[in-house]
Image: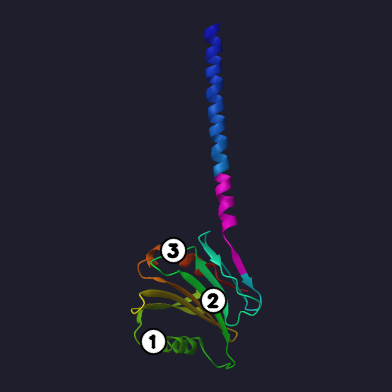
Amino acid sequence: MLKKESTFEFRLSIFDFFRSLALLLAMLAFSGNGLTQVLEQTFSDEVAGFKISTPNSRWHFEPRGSAPGAQRAMILFESPLHQFLPNVSVRLTETLDTKTSLEDFFQKEQEALPSTVQILEKKKISRGQAKGYELSWKDPASGILFLQWFFLVNQRQYILTCAAKEESYPRVLPDFRLILNSFQLL
């Protein structure tokens, strides 16, 4: 009889162990998804007509005040990497010239770059109905790499700029891509 009780207790403890393990795994699975959603932030600018999101808790929006001007949003990394704070900015300017084309806008922006920069890549892109350009370039003097998106929509010129030191660029590039891909015109 003593043997039956210990076998029963053993079976009960194994059952409790697996039940607890299943409960723990379920809690981890559900809390992981909830945690990811809570740590992402989305910023909408109804006046400028866009929204953009951070990919995780390592990035945050910098407060911009009530009169942001051309700089509509600034997203900063949690801390400097290689003595530089990786960042993403959204700039908006409006053109009065209704004949300005995307190509003209993009060409003027490239011409405004210092002559010492190295253009790494440029290509056409699209976000929904909006057509644009992607430009990757490096400033050798500072060692900073830039990834920029350019859009011209209804006489509004959008420039999204990602910047990081060359040494940390590979580390933050996946986050840059997530932030850029979250950009939506409203």
Q: Earlier in the sequence, mark 3 or mark 2?
A: 2
Against 2, residue 57 (above or below) is: below
Q: Residue furthest front?
A: 83
Question: Residue 105 got which mark?
Answer: none
Stretch in magenta: 29-43
Q: Could you tell me how far apart the alpha carbons at marks 2 and 1 are, in whole angstroms? A: 20 Å
Residue 5 drawn above or below residue 130 = above
- Secondary-structure class at tag 2: strand
Q: Give the prevailing secondary structure in the magenta stretch.
A: helix
Of marks 3 and 2, the one in the foreground = 2
Q: Eyeballing the image, is 106 above or below 136?
A: below
Task: Specify few, some or many for label 3: CA neighbours under 10 Å numbering under 14, 14-19, or 20 or more.
Answer: few
Which element type, helix, strand or loop, lies under badge 3? helix
Q: Residue at x 43, y 64 (%)?
A: 172
Q: Considering only order in the chain, which callout, 1 or 2, is on the residue closer to the N terminus?
A: 2
Can you name the residue that lies furthest to the top here?
Answer: 1
Q: Is residue 45 magenta?
A: no
N-term mark: 3 or 1: 1
In the picture, the disc for residue 90 is 2
The residue at which mark 3 appears reads as 174
Q: Nearer the viewer, residue 101 or 142?
A: 142
Instruction: Give how far across and how far down residue 113 sits, in percent.
Output: 41, 86
Please provide percent x and percent y for residue 32. 55, 48
Q: Mark 1 sits on what residue?
A: 114
Locate residue 86, reporting x and y percent.
Answer: 45, 69
Q: Say whether residue 54 is visible.
A: no
Query: Which amino acid type is marked by label 3?
Result: Pro
- Please indicate whether residue 103 sits to the left or right of residue 92 in the image: left
